[in-house]
Each structure stands twice: as structure tokens, then as C-alpha cells.
Image: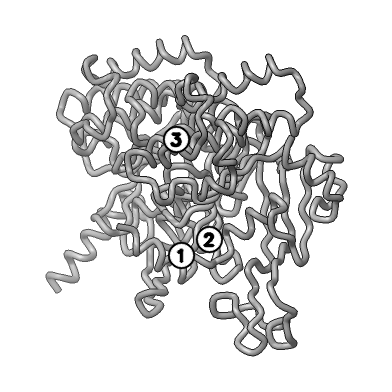
Amino acid sequence: MVKVENLSKEFIMHIRNDAQIEGFEGICLEVEAGTLTAVTGPSGCGKSSLLKCIYRTYTPTGGHVWYTRENGEQTDLATAEPWEIIELRKQEIGYVSQFFSVIPRVSAMDILEQTQTSRGVEEKAAREKAEEYLSCVGISKSLWDMYPATFSGGEKQRLNIANALITKPRFLLLDEPTASLDKVSKEWVMKLILDLKDQGTAMLGVFHDEIAIHTLADQRFEMRERHLVDMDYKMDYASEVLAEAIG
Amino acid sequence: MNKKMPILTGRNITVRFGEGCPYCMTHTELEKGRCPFCHTIWAVRDVSFNLYPGEILGIVGESGSGKSTLLKTLYFDVPATAGDVRLTLYHEGKDNILHCSTQNQRYLRNHLMGMVYQNPMLGLRMDLSSGANIAEKLIAAGNRNAGQMMKRCQGLLQHVEIPVERMKDAPKVFSGGMQQRVQISKAIANNPPILFLDEVTTGLDLSVQAKVLDLIRTIQQELGIAMMIVSHDLAVIRMMSDRTMVMLGGRVVEEGLTDQILEDPLHEYTQTLVSSLL
């Protein structure tokens, strides 16, 4: 459903003497419907940038992201027009960011409702489903009509996840969805992700948490020196480095 | 993917104050849009855009970058030197509206577009009652039934949260935020599919700003109006717009998804702008 071909990203900071910062290059991977691909690697190696390039919060420098839409048409997310990306984000592609940025002065309940009604779900049904998801991720009822700006980090993150999952996207990008969650909410979130996977959603996620990877992932890549290597290779890589170090 | 039909398209819009000279005719990158030889001001230069139905397009840039002039040109307040603007709902987009008669331009302003200015003095008659201000717009659109108009005025004022009993009061006795809300209700009186907003919250205090912006967002969600929002405030743009154009010296230097403009600005000026965000 999603095929990433030779994707690369380089940042040029014009205001810092045109400094070039390399993000990643030559990324190739495929994500099938109903599977989850995990990307791991040390922080700062470009994992989040990869997700952002696919979601187009960043503009990729080169390469393609072939996405097969629900109607069977293929779109290159790397070069699609902004309005096309806006439509896809509304209808098919979800993204759970690492840090939740909320619309100010809209209550948790209204956020979840609006996410659905903007996609044509009826108000009553939207409200019921919002209630279901809010309890599902364990946000206490007294907070439902509060502004999320006042929530704790974990509550924000759980709302963020509920907001991304409630529309059942066909393709979901997850940036450390289980970070900053306690054990119980982590299990709730993992269950929601598994349910969604069973329903056929293709997922690409950045993870640090080994338990989450073992529970959720069907395929796993490690980002090393701006390239992707799959896990077996990583073991070889590690032994190579070790061998070199030992001399 | 099917091509999406824009509701409004602009191509190579230019607004020039002065005759121009061989130098500035050929050099597009002028400091502040001003020719160093003939002192012609290129307020807007070769600006092209598409506005899609129901979306919010943000326009950011420093003072004097031409963003307000662009809106005022589209609303026929400032004549364009050159350019082509088509409105899908007007003659199926076959005519360049910059060239249509004054009468037709008035029709467009009253039926298909609304404008909210930074300065309420430009959009309202300060001495007339708020009700009369809105009624003026309704009458301009051909409405003659006093009872109906009264009802519509009440509905609109309620919509922008102004107590109906203040309908008889003139905007000059209102606070800045209230004036802005009356202006908004006047601008949407005839249910236009397009609304232009020119720095509507600049100069208002923070809590009032928030209220006006929330109101605009609610109206947009309820009525699905396509909006062009000009602001020098990135926070306003981040909260309101789906797509953003960045203007500098009369030209569009970058455009894209709002989150991309804010998180991965590509042009030097946009990088400076984003890094200045408090």
C-alpha cells in the first residue's frame, strides 16, 4: 500500500550561513495493509524526519512515496500538491506526533467530535464514538469538557492517539506513540493499535520500547548513518563494529 | 486523482505605483519592492494562487510586503496593474474579474465576496447603527423586505455574540473587538462563498483576539466559506490556515502546507520569520 523509494532529506539553514544538515538518504521500504513496520535507532538519526517527510510536514529533497489510495489510484506523497495532501490527511492518512499540539480553547470531547464531523460523521454518532475512545484511552470523565492545554503530558498523548485512531485511517504514522505513557495506558494504546491493524490499517512507526515492538511490529528496520538496515543486518553491523574496535 | 476545482484563481497579479523603468521592469528582486532608480513601488508582483472551496489560505509577510494590497486588489479596492483573476461562480470563470465593469464588480463584492478590514472604520459606517450597517449590505444585494432584513440582522448579531438590544447602537460606541465582530457579521450577511480577512485581530488585546479568531473558525466550519487570511502573526496563521503563502517585497517567496512552512521553511526569509517566533 505504501512504497518508499530512495527518499532523502537535507536541510539547508540559510540563516546559519547556508549550513547543510543531512537528514537521511536512500530510504526504501514498503508497508502492506494490516501490518506495522517499526523504525528504531538512536535519537537524532532522522527517524522522526522520515515520518514527517512522508506526512509532508517536511518537504523531501528527493525520492518518492507511492501511496495507493482507497480508490486504487497511486499518488506520490513526496510531490503531491498541498491540497491533495490536505485531502488525504482528512480522509486516509493519520499521524500521531511525538508532541501534541492542540487547537486552543476546544475541549477534548469537541476535538474528537470535530475530527469526525469534518469527515461527514453525524454529530450524535460522533459524540458516542468520542465517548467510547476517551474512556478507551483512560481519560477521566471529569476532563472530557476541559481544554487539553491543561492536561498532563500523558493525558495529552493519549488524547492525541485517540484523535488519530478514531477515524480509522488507512495509513497511520506513529512517532513514539507509547513514550511518556504508564504501563496501563501503554497497554490500552497497544490494544487500540492492534485492533486497527486487524482492520487493515498500514502503519509505520518510530519506537524505542522493545515490548511495544515485539507486540506490534511485523517488520523492523534500524536507522544507521542516515540509511535503513533491517534487523539481521544490524546484528552483523554490530559485530563488525565490535570486530573493528577489538582490532 | 481528480483535479480539484479552485473557487478563485489569480495569475500574475501585479500592482505597481509608478511608471516603472527598464531596470525595475527586468529585475524582479527589488529591496522592499522599490526600484532604486525610478522609485516605482511594486506592491504586488506576479502573484499567482489558487483558493479551493472551503479552505483557509493564510498570507504572511512583514509590513509592506504587499499582502494587504493583494487582498484589496481582489476586493477591487486597489486597481491591479496587470493580472488575471477568475471566480468559478462568476460566468463559470470565463471572465477576468479585474476587467469587468464597475457595476459587475459591485455585484461581486455584494454577493460573492466579503471583506473584513484591520481598521473597522473602513468596513463600517461608524455613525449608523449596527443594524443599519448590516442592512446596508443586505440592501446592496437587492433585499427590500424590512421585516426579513430585521430578522437577518438579529440572527447575524447573535451569531457574532452581540446582544440584539445593541442593534440600534452605532459601532463608534463599541469596543474594538465588538466593532470587529460587527464587521464580520456585515461581511457574511449575504452568505458569500469567499471571505477576505485583513489583519483582523491586529491591535486587539489577547483575550479579544482569541474570541474573534474562535468566531471566524466557527463561521468557517459552519458555513464552509473559503477564506484568505492576511496576518503578520504566525500564531494566527498556525491556528487558522490549511495552506500558507509567504510574501516578501511584493512577491510570493514560498507557499505550502502551513505545518510545512512552520516546521520546514525552505526560503531564507521564511526561515528568518519562523525563527523570530516567540
| Local crowd size for mark 2, using a 10 Å CA cut-off: few (<14), some (14–19), many (≥20) | many
Q: Residue at x 79, y 28 (%)?
A: B142
On the same chain: label 3 and label 2? yes
Q: Nearer the viewer, mark 3 or mark 1?
A: 3
Identify the residue position indicated by label 1 in the image.
Answer: B270
Q: Residue at x 56, y 19 (%)?
A: B154
Badge 1: chain ID: B
Q: Residue at x 85, y 51 (%)?
A: B100
Identify the residue position indicated by label 2 in the image.
Answer: B246
B238 relative to B125 in the view: left or right: left
Q: Earlier in the sequence, mark 3 or mark 1?
A: 3
Q: Amino acid at mark 1?
A: Thr
Under circle 2, the secondary element is strand
Q: Position of residue B178 (x, y in %)?
A: 44, 35
Under circle 3, the secondary element is helix
On the same chain: label 3 and label 1? yes
Residue A11 placement: quadrant: bottom left
Tell me: residue B62, above or below residue A77: below
Under circle 1, the secondary element is helix
Q: Position of residue B242 (x, y in %)?
A: 52, 44
